[in-house]
Image (cartoon, rainbow, N blue to C red):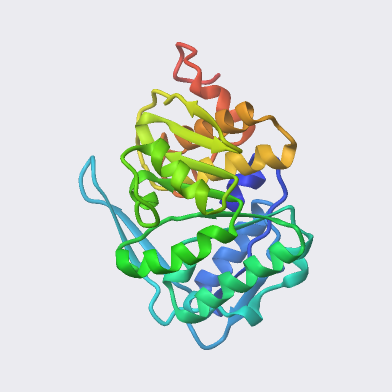
Amino acid sequence: MAIGVSRLGGRSAWIGRVGDDEFGELLRSTLAGEGVDVRGMRVDPDAPTGLMIKSRRTAEVVDVRYYRSASAGSRLCPADLDTSMIRSARVLHVTGITPALSASAVEAVRAAIAEARDAGVTVSMDVNYRRALWTPAEASAVLREIVPTVDVMFATEAEARLVVEGDDQLALARALADLGPRHVLVKRGSLGAMELSDGVVRHAEPHRVTEVDPVGAGDAFAAGWIAETLAGAGPEERLATASAAGAFAVTADGDWESLPRRSDLGLLRPSGDAVSR
């Protein structure tokens, strides 16, 4: 997500914990190479960098496995936070994956949000529910505590139902907004997206694209919305860019590798020529 914001012209930083190993160095060099500030990266000499292994089982099914137990990331704690970076930011973005890793990681998320709110920094959260990391009941208990403390909420319909009840995306968005967030974005994949901001409902129609790899679409969507927020764009442009970024991300292999730059978004408009010369 930090790479997505950077590619769209925003300034981003990543705070987290990696092992003192080749995977940790790969993360550091990759993020730095994409223009992401890595001063908030902590190196743990006693635990390995967590891994996510992705494989394509069939043409339609992508299998994702997590190896995060006892990883450096699972040992994230409030003391790892660079509070000056958080307090000087315009947006703090957190993910529901982090609190799924450990009790200390939950505390780190709570501490980061508290710092941001105290400094008047907008807090954004993507639910990013991963059933391999925690049960729906475990996720619901933590999310119901965190959601009232955020300003911007990204969720699929299924993720929203971990927190609130509702028959459709609008009912779910309103129920989430009633808990506190000013902006609620419901991602619907190939059906587009819906935003409820300050009581106003907006819809993003889906882009017709050929899906190659769905992993990373949600991060691209959030990156597009936040990058436009940082650029001072209006609500219609903000949602349109988010939708386009999410659609673009599924058209190529990779997680962060397929995230678009602004010049890429124009490729979603059919030109009649599949080869750029």
- The image shows residue 91, relative to residue 65, as above or below, that is above
- Occupied quadrant, residue 14: bottom right
**Pick the front one: 90 or 30:** 90
- In this view, the residue farthest toward the front is 178
Using the image as rendered, state which of residue 13 and residue 232 is in the foreground: 232
Q: Residue at x 71, y 72 (%)?
A: 82
Residue 234 placement (x, y as % from top left):
68, 29
Can residue 217 be seen by looking at this rendering?
Answer: no
- Residue 46's place in the image compared with 53, above or below, is below
Query: Which quadrant would residue 172 be assigned to in this image?
Result: top left
Q: Quadrant of residue 197?
A: top right
Residue 37 coordinates in the image, percent (x, y): 71, 60
Query: From what the image shows, is residue 9 above or below residue 80?
Result: above
75 shown above or below 144 = below
One can see residue 214 in this view: yes
At a point 49% along the width and 13% down the height, the residue shown is 271
- Foreground pick, 2 / 257: 2
Residue 257 position within the rendered picture, expressed as x and y whole percent measured from the top left: 50, 46
Quarter of the image containing the C terminus? top right
Front in this rendered view, residue 4 or 53: 4
Task: Name the residue located 66 percent from the left edge and 46 percent from the top edge.
Answer: 6
Identity of the residue furthest to the top in this view: 272
- Outermost residue, bottom side: 46
Name the spot of residue 170 as percent of width and height, x first: 42, 36
Count up the numbered dots: 0
Give the residue drawn at x 41%, y 34%. 251
